[in-house]
Image: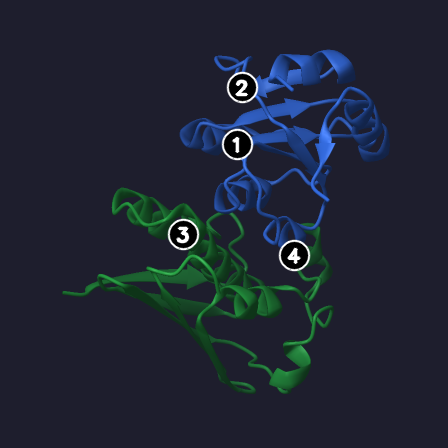
Chain colours: A green, B blue
Amino acid sequence: MAISFEYKVTGGDFTHAGYASSQVKKMLKQLGVDSTVIKRVVVCLYEAEVNIVAHAWDGVINVELDTDIIFMKLTDNGPGIANIGQAMQKGFSTASPEVREMGFGAGMGLPNISANADNFVIKSKPGVGTILEITINLNSAAV
Amino acid sequence: MKVEEICSVLNGELVCGSDKPNREVTHAFASDLMSDVLTVSCNNLLLITGLANLQTIRTAEMSDIDCILFVRNKSVTTEMKLLAEELGMTLIKCPSTMFRASGELYRAGMKPLF
């Protein structure tokens, strides 16, 4: 039976960025999930969570956990992404200097998510927002 | 290399995790870019960074890094220290630049990741 969690994320709030990822990590550890898989999950979720804080006005993270799979959907209200292909390229970023000062905004977030997810879908509407859907099989250590 | 040895080599100050001076790290990775840190995978890793904010601690948490060395005398805020304590991390600060700190640790036997 699947368990569901929802976390709200506020744009620009770097003090709490990573809270949802931290909670999910603790939960997966308690469930005894393989540490390599946990790392892949939290790298995806943390990069995506930081993206909402860095680029959007607000957002919601929905996590659905089943016995052998984790599905994470991140929906934000924000400027959206005009060219997803360009955004997926390593090194491309529209991040502000403030975001770069936090150690992000080097154009590695989406490629990092793509590299760690078993399935990664990104949809965006400029001026409206972005939806990320990330799926990871909890029983496989390698991508 | 033990945490207390790192402090000794770099004239560093243990600002969090003083109850674990014998904690050991074998490899080090130096970066101010947190997305780079998230790409590395290694047990017993020391993160050397000049980026001192809450996201440094969060990134280390996500990367399973238990020991962070802050270079260039960067200040560790109370919020950073509280979060690191909660996560059982060791935080060290030293006056050296990242280049010097990395060089001194390498000379003392710390291994690079690759």
Q: Quadrant of the N terminus of chain A?
A: bottom left
> Residue at 55% of width from left, 81% of height from top?
A80
Q: Secondary structure at mark 1?
A: loop
Q: Give the spatial CA distance, label 1 vs label 4.
A: 20 Å
Residue position for label 4? A104
Cα separation between marks 1 and 2: 9 Å
| Same chain, labels 3 and 2 | no
Judged from this view, the residue extending furthest toward the left is: A1
Cα separation between marks 3 and 2: 23 Å
Residue A12 horizontal/vertical position (percent)? 55, 59
Q: Nearer the viewer, mark 1 or mark 4?
A: 1
Left or right side of A143 for A100: right
* Residue A69 location (% of width, % of height): 30, 66
Near mark 2 (Cα within 10 A), the count class, few <14, some 14-19 or many ≥20, is some
Residue A4 x, y percent position in the rendering: 23, 64
Observer able to see residue A103:
no
